[in-house]
Image (cartoon, rainbow, N blue to C red):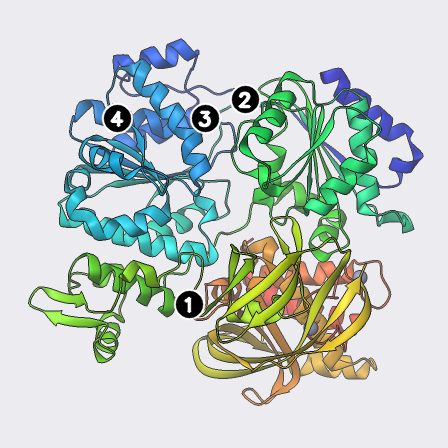
Amino acid sequence: MATAVRDFLGLLAADPGFREQVVHIEPVPPRRARYGDLSRPLPDGLRAYCDGKGVRLYTHQCAAIEHLRAGENVIITTPTASGKTLAFLLPVFERLAADPAATALFLYPTKALANDQVKVVRELERSSGIGVDAAIYDGDTPAGRRPAIRERSRVILSNPHELHRVLAWHVKWSRFFRNLRFVVVDEAHRYRGVAGSHMAMLLRRLARIAGHYGARPQFVLSSATLANPAEFAARLTGEEAIPVGEDGSPAGAKTFVLCNPSAGGGGRSVHSVTKDLLLTLVESGCRTLCFTVSRKLAELIAIRSGSVPGISTYRAGYLPKDRRAIEDALKDGSLRGVVTTNALELGIDIGSLDGVISGYPGTMISVRQQAGRSGRRSGESFAVLVAFENPLDQYFMRHLQAFFSRPCEHAVVDTGNPYILSGHLLCAAAELPVDPERDGRWFGADLPEMLAAFERVHLLRKASRGWIYAGQGRAADTVGLDAVSSDTFRVMHGARLLETMDRGQAYREGHPGAVLLHRGETYAVTGMDLDRQTIRVEETDTDTYTQPLSTTDVAVVRELRCRDIGGVQVSFGDVTVTEEVVGYTVRHYGRAVSYHRLDLPPLHLETKALWFILPDRAAEAVAAGGRDLAGGLHGAEHALIAVMPHHAVCDRRDIGGLSTPLHPATGAPTIFVYDGYEGGIGLAEKAFDLLPAITGTAHELVRDCGCAAGCPACIYSPKCGNQNQPLDRVAAVMILGDLAGRLSVMGAPL
Ligand SMILES: [Zn+2]
Ligand SMILES: [Zn+2]
């Protein structure tokens, strides 16, 4: 297979069609395995299992085992396929063997992953002879089997949604919680932003219940590589954790190929370049996986590649047996190319591949996970990245060293969102009486005020042992683990619930006439009922998309932090954002083809924001250069938001911005960057800490863009409510350059 990879690289170099677009080829040398030793041997059964599988432990596995033996919490952040699962399974089983009552809870983000992993756990159970009665306990578990699992199983695999419901029934689970020694959170990096805030509160509720029964479980987090593993783990679990990230597993040589269709005036579309790459690869005999952003694109590429046998599409909507068939064909080689939406990114085994083609998936975390799909322990493989014309992709195409040397992003978890916190407080009060003294450590300093506020609205009642839930219905039903508030809209496709949206997202993306992308499928919104909070959609096959137009105002409620960095006054605090979605444009390949008015009530968002005042000298320089200050500030605001995902994992949609040459709260030219969620999710706060680095990246992005007056690769924003008006690229470069220069006195933490 190594020759197939080399043939492919040769073809790329020889073909003038590719030569122009290949901006960079980066060989990553193979890595030898580094093995470790344990301070004392594993029990016989576990040793027999390892010997039977030919497993010799890598250094990072040994490190994780020793830390867990020592009673510490651990976050393991080594790459895909480095043996992370074994690194925690072995010490967990060791403890369960030594203590015949001990139990462990494994949490997976999806049922599919739990179903996949239970096989591994059961095999270990069988061949080690350590009986743990491993079982899945989730929404699919038949009612008749549940009591036996609660009473007997020592390893239970579940998911956050199930745990959220189970905690109220802890009395039935007393054996399990009393003996709980380990809580394993797999794919922990997925719990960030809103999901992270919920998971953090859920794990605190779990620890509180375990504590009630006298147990204090250790946490094991298995995660993709992150820039801030220790901080992330501490935020998520409320406890200190030791990061284990130095990978001892071997890897074959890998070649990264960066392709930029918009380079050299190219004029070719990303799709056609992707299709040609796929064909070239498959023809060279490489087994290749091609990721696309939408189902439509996946099918387009597959159809255009139709002349070549051995290429198929794969997507989330397929029936399990069809998916299995594709996976098997890929493994046995009868299929050589598979085009898929990101549905495949999550841990399902598809065997080892020669290569992966993808766009920039939005984070380095995903780049490494997708690239991790190709390659094997030895032998060569490659990853081709095809850049879209947007700031995130284009920044990397121009700053290659940043791409290959950059640490992964920070994963942000905010435990202070009052809306999320209060929902979980109600759940906690329904599980066990809440005592302001004892439970302050779980629910923060504002706990007494929250309790009093809930008493006033009769949701909590003070009893002798603490505050108890007094609301109607089950407390757990009032908290959705995917949303901040219960003010959500349901998106219905016929009788099927596609997804839920908060009110702001519903107004912006779910208004009548909107085109909606959901898991790679395209839908048209046919109706929106504001009273019932329901959005109706139909499947559609359109090439167009829609963009909302809005006006935004930000009012400062309270400044929480403020600092002067090199003469720039930077603040962080509570704000109220008022947004009116006034209409939308229908767009076709970036061009607006029609405009429609909307009549929606204004949105009010109480959230957290970062803001800073442009120093007088910078404003004067812009004026002296004959440039437009408003256009420069607006461009700088767009660029700052565009590069945020390079520093802290988020989606552009998670953040909003406002810039103005004169803001009433500051009396000066000001830029605001705010969290797009009620109560905030920690992004603006992280940006406050990382502002020097973020400003530096934004400056490089705009300064180094080859365009004349701004373009989608630098200061145009696809979500600008003002149709990208006004924008002045030269002024934006002046402003960002001035800010970056002043802020750099701090030294960039990233
Ligand atoms: Zn540009
Ligand atoms: Zn804008």
Mark 4 within 8 Å of ligand 2, using the beta carbon? no
Q: Earlier in the sequence, mark 4 or mark 2?
A: 4
Looking at this view, is 170 or 616 the one in front?
A: 170
Looking at this view, is 552 or 638 the one in front?
A: 552
Q: Residues within 10 Å of mark 1 (few under 14, many from 20)?
A: some
Residue at 46 percent of width and 36 percent of height: 112
Q: Residues within 10 Å of mark 2 (few under 14, many from 20)?
A: some
**What is the distance, in whole Å, between disc 3 and disc 4 at their CAs?**
23 Å
Question: Closer to the observer: label 4 or label 2?
Answer: 4
Labels 3 and 2 touching (C-beta < 8 A): no
Q: Earlier in the sequence, mark 3 or mark 4?
A: 3
**Which residue in the protein does label 1 denote?**
485
Ligand 1 location (quadrant): bottom right
Q: Residues within 10 Å of mark 3 (few under 14, many from 20)?
A: some
**Which residue in the protein does label 4 denote?**
133
Which x, y percent locates residue 481? 40, 56
Labels 3 and 4 touching (C-beta < 8 A): no
**What is the distance, in whole Å, between disc 4 and disc 1 at their CAs?**
38 Å
Q: Amino acid at mark 4?
A: Asp
